[in-house]
Amino acid sequence: MSFFVINHQWTYTPPTTHDILWVFNFDGILNDLGALEGELIIFEEGSLAVDFETTSGAHFILGSTKKFDYNLVLGTSSLHTSKQALYNSQKQIESIYKELKTKRVIDE
């Protein structure tokens, strides 16, 4: 994942092994994409280059990666490779929370 600031034009060419690309525009307008401030754009799968253009300047975060070979499990605030991994993570968080409460590091 990378943070970019462009003032005119820029082309991103992902590695040939990457087939997923997304952009979050948080300031300015990316003209070619029609992306307004605060919009997330997820591109179709592929590894083609993408041209970015702005007339007013834009700040955005771009991520590209290789698609996972397995299904992902979404937690309330996390992503895991299996239901068991999600369960284990939740149990570990619960354990840490109880320990911090016992030590009076946090109150509830």
Image: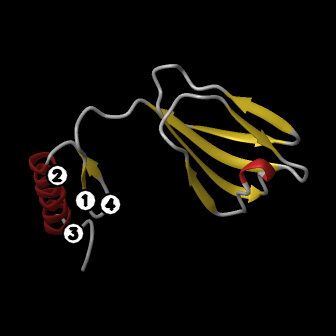
Q: Give the residue pinned by disc 2.
A: 86
Sooner in the amino-acid sequence: mark 2 or mark 4: 4
Identity of the residue furthest to the top in this view: 16
Sooner in the amino-acid sequence: mark 1 or mark 2: 1
- Element type at mark 3: loop
What amino acid is at disc 4? Answer: Ser
Q: Give the residue pinned by disc 4.
A: 77
Q: Give the residue pinned by disc 3.
A: 104
How busy is the neighbourhood of tag 3: few (under 14 within 10 Å), some, or many (20 plus)? few
- Element type at mark 1: loop
What amino acid is at disc 1? Answer: Gly
Q: Where is residue 15 in the image (x, y as percent from the top left)?
A: 54, 21
How busy is the neighbourhood of tag 2: few (under 14 within 10 Å), some, or many (20 plus)? some
Q: Position of residue 48 (x, y in %)?
A: 60, 29
What amino acid is at disc 2? Answer: Leu
Q: Are marks 1 and 4 in contact (CB under 8 Å)?
A: yes
Q: Nearer the viewer, mark 3 or mark 2?
A: 2
Identity of the residue furthest to the bottom in this view: 108
Instruction: Give the CA separation, mark 4 to mark 3.
Output: 25 Å
In the image, taking residue 16 as reference, residue 39 lies left or right, namely: right
Instruction: Give the CA separation, mark 1 to mark 4.
Output: 5 Å
Q: Position of residue 43 (x, y in %)?
A: 55, 45
Instruction: Give the CA separation, mark 3 to mark 2.
Output: 27 Å
In the image, taking residue 56 as reference, residue 5 lies left or right, namely: left
Sooner in the amino-acid sequence: mark 3 or mark 2: 2
Q: Give the residue pinned by disc 1.
A: 75
- Element type at mark 4: loop
Q: Which residue is at 74% across, 57% downward?
A: 34
Q: Are marks 2 and 4 in contact (CB under 8 Å)?
A: no
